[in-house]
Image (cartoon, rainbow, N blue to C red):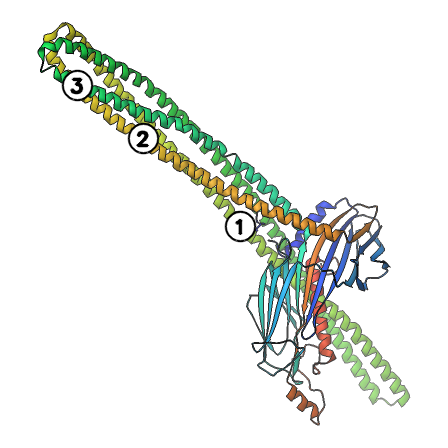
């Protein structure tokens, strides 16, 4: 299979991992997923920064809580920048003593920097152009119409190609164009996401055309986030299965060597055909010589008696030779019939192999279709959940508006009431505090529901990608089945043609045997006449003339039979040569392709196993319960982009007498105040949102998003 494919997408890994994990850890204490994320941040004008994040997630498969000590041994010269709660740090070791609830899960994480350590599974080349000129600064002085171009080049650095996801947040006031068609789109409130998914090397250019800088004549372009993923456990299992299948295929192809033995044995048939042609030609020449001897007796009557003796001797010799030839032809017929039976047996074996191969491919195709059906059910469930979340979101937002309206109305009543100012101020302060609390609480709830809606949209897009790739795997299986069936059919047709040639030879040998029987009968009569001529010289003359004619006719028939046998010799030689070339070419090509694929997979498996062992050396696990372990490697790139500012227009606006901040009808919830704090917070929030979504899409989530 290709690498079925031939390659698995980032959306396919979590689904397959979940299915395999259920089978592997049904009776285990824990299912542990160890994720290593190497995160690189690019900032224009500031260079790059990198950090490493180790994450371990333990899922309990027991009906009671279990203790687990889990942690990481950090590489030398590491500096911890973050660790999840209740961690213990001892030298280069950071660990947690946790209790995993029954059928629940627990996660730990540490983030650190290290100037000497990195895990590179993908290499990123990125170039920023402003109006077709290379640019490296955090601020771009430009106006509407400014063109910012970002080139991204991904190159695989891992033993096997990782799966890549590129996320882009679309903004108002910017027109976008891309060199690659996006894999999908997602929407969260007024925020739109575009994403691309690929495997291995990938190139993408994004064009940002500024169309509206807004009232403050500035806009900060949102970062682009790239996440590459390599699941070493799942990929190793896939490679092992592919190697086992190729080994089986090579073993089956090696069995076809017996056909070469059969073709080698056919040399005996060719030798017998050539000898038959030579013997027939030799006998014809003797007959011609005997006829010449008979003709000479007409000139010398006094030697008739002697010629009669010589004629009888010659006829006796030819009769013996022809009798021996008549004995050889049936043996050739039997040998030809045996070869025909052997070829028929080979055709039946090839037809049996063709049916078995077709059955295996149909079974694999059915498995792929079953997986597609499962994905369709999952998409239907996600659509239902999305509808429910949208309903809750709208209801919560409506509630927020109603409460705000009621509190505003209450403020109006208090302001219009005839109470003393102290009470009025106290009541208004209480209402203001309530509005602030309600706004904060409901705002957080709306944000959480919005995040859920975004996760559902991305998960649904990834399921669609999985369905497309599974369909591609099914098509590859179908094409492979057609190719194998065509190859076996060609071999079977070649053998059938050889059998037809052998059958023609068999019939020709039968005709030759009939001609020999007729010639033997004629020679038997000629021998009797020659015997009588020995005692009766006078009649010999007339009989000798007739015998000479008979001998010449027989010689002509034998010459024709010799030519026919020689023609059959060349036809059978050509047929057997073509058959041998066809079998060796087809089987040799298939075996060579299978051997090359297996060598490639074995190299990838060995390299992947080495990477997995290196990463496992940094993981610490102490528990009495059994557990299974999967190692996932990710590499994240955060490409920050500069802000576009029309400096002259902005200075004029600031120096004007009206300093009121104008409203921006295009704002997505964040008021643009130049390129200050709010814009920076918006960029940071976008990155955090994308990283969270990519983590959920890659790892799955056991909370309310399922």
Residue at x-position 78% and y-position 62%: 111
Q: Secondary structure at mark 2?
A: helix
* Mark positioned earlier in the residue sequence (1 or 2): 1
Position of residue 352 relative to residue 474, above or below, is above
Say which quarter of the image contains residue 132. Answer: bottom right
Residue annotated with mark 3: 291
Q: Do we see residue 18 in this rendering?
A: no
| 3 or 2: mark nearer the eye | 3
| 1 or 3: mark nearer the eye | 3
- Say whether marks 1 and 3 touch (CB < 8 Å): no
> x, y percentage for residue 515?
25, 21
Q: How far separated are the C-alphas under marks 1 and 3? A: 73 Å
Q: How far separated are the C-alphas under marks 3 and 2? A: 29 Å
Position of residue 476 relative to residue 38, above or below, is above
> x, y percentage for residue 274?
33, 27
Dot 3, how many residues are within 10 Å of its Cα: few (below 14), some (14-19), or many (20+)? many
Closer-to-camera residue (310/426): 310
| 1 or 2: mark nearer the eye | 2
Q: How far separated are the C-alphas under marks 1 and 2? A: 45 Å
Position of residue 693 relative to residue 311, above or below, is below
Residue at x-position 60% and y-position 58%: 200
Q: Secondary structure at mark 1?
A: helix
Residue at x-position 35% and y-position 23%: 333
Furthest toward the bottom, the residue is: 657
Q: Label for residue 476? A: 1
Residue annotated with mark 2: 568
């Amino acid at each position: 299979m290709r690498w079925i494919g031939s390659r698995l997408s980032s959306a396919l890994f979590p689904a397959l991992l979940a299915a395999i994990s259920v089978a592997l850890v049904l009776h285990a204490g824990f299912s542990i997923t160890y994720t290593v994320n190497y995160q690189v941040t690019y900032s224009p004008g500031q260079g790059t920064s990198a950090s490493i994040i180790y994450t371990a997630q333990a899922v309990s498969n027991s009906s009671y809580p279990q203790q687990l000590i889990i942690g990481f041994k950090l590489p030398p010269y590491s500096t911890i920048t973050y660790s999840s709660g209740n961690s213990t740090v001892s030298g280069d070791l950071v660990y947690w003593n946790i209790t995993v609830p029954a059928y629940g899960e627990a996660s730990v994480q540490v983030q650190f920097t290290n100037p000497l350590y990195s895990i590179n599974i993908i290499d990123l080349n990125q170039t920023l152009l402003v109006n077709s000129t290379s640019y490296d600064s955090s601020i771009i002085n430009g106006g509407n119409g400014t063109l910012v171009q970002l080139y991204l080049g991904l190159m695989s650095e891992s033993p096997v190609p990782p799966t890549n996801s590129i996320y882009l947040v679309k903004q108002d006031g910017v027109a976008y164009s891309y060199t690659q068609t996006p894999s999908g789109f997602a929407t969260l409130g007024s925020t739109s996401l575009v994403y691309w998914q690929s495997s291995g090397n990938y190139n993408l250019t994004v064009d940002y055309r500024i169309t509206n800088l807004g009232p403050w004549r500035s806009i900060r372009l949102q970062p682009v986030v790239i996440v590459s993923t390599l699941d070493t456990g799942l990929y190793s299992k896939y490679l092992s299965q592919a190697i086992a299948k190729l080994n089986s295929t090579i073993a089956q192809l090696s069995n076809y060597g017996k056909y070469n033995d059969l073709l080698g044995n056919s040399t005996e048939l060719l030798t017998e055909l050539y000898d038959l042609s030579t013997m027939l030609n030799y006998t014809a020449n003797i007959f011609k010589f005997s006829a010449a001897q008979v003709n000479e007796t007409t000139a010398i009557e006094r030697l008739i008696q002697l010629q009669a003796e010589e004629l009888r001797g010659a006829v006796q010799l030819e009769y013996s030779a022809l009798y021996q030839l008549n004995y050889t032809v049936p043996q050739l017929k039997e040998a030809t019939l045996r070869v025909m039976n052997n070829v028929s047996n080979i055709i039946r074996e090839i037809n049996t192999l063709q049916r078995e191969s077709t059955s295996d491919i149909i079974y694999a195709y059915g498995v792929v279709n079953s997986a597609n059906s499962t994905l369709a059910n999952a998409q239907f469930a996600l659509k239902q959940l999305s509808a429910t979340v949208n309903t809750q979101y709208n209801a919560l937002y409506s509630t927020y508006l109603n409460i705000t309206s009621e509190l505003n109305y209450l403020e109006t009543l208090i302001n219009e009431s005839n109470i003393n100012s102290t009470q009025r101020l106290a009541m208004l302060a209480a209402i203001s505090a309530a509005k602030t609390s309600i706004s904060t609480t409901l705002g957080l709830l709306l944000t959480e529901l919005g995040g859920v809606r975004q996760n559902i949209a991305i998960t649904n897009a990834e399921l669609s990608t999985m369905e497309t790739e599974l369909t591609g795997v099914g098509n590859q299986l179908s094409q492979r089945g057609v190719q194998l069936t065509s190859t076996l059919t060609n071999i079977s047709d070649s053998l059938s043609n050889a059998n037809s040639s052998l059958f023609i030879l068999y019939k020709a040998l039968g005709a030759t045997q009939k001609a020999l029987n007729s010639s033997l009968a004629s020679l038997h009569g000629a021998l009797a006449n020659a015997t009588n001529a020995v005692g009766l010289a006078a009649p010999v003359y007339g009989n000798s003339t007739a015998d000479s004619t008979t001998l010449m006719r027989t010689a002509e028939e034998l010459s024709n039979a010799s030519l026919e046998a020689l023609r059959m010799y060349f036809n059978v030689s050509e047929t057997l040569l073509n058959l041998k070339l066809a079998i060796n070419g087809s089987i040799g090509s298939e075996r060579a392709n299978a051997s090359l694929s297996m060598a490639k997979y074995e190299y990838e498996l060995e390299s992947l196993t080495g990477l997995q062992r290196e990463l496992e050396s940094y993981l610490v696990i102490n528990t009495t319960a059994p557990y299974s372990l999967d190692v996932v490697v990710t590499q994240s790139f955060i490409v920050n982009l500069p802000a576009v500012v029309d400096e002259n227009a902005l200075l004029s606006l600031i120096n004007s007498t009206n300093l009121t901040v104008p409203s921006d009808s295009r704002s997505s919830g964040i008021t643009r105040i130049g390129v200050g704090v709010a814009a920076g917070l918006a960029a940071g929030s976008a990155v955090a949102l994308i990283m969270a979504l990519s983590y959920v899409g890659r790892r799955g989530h056991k909370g309310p998003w399922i």
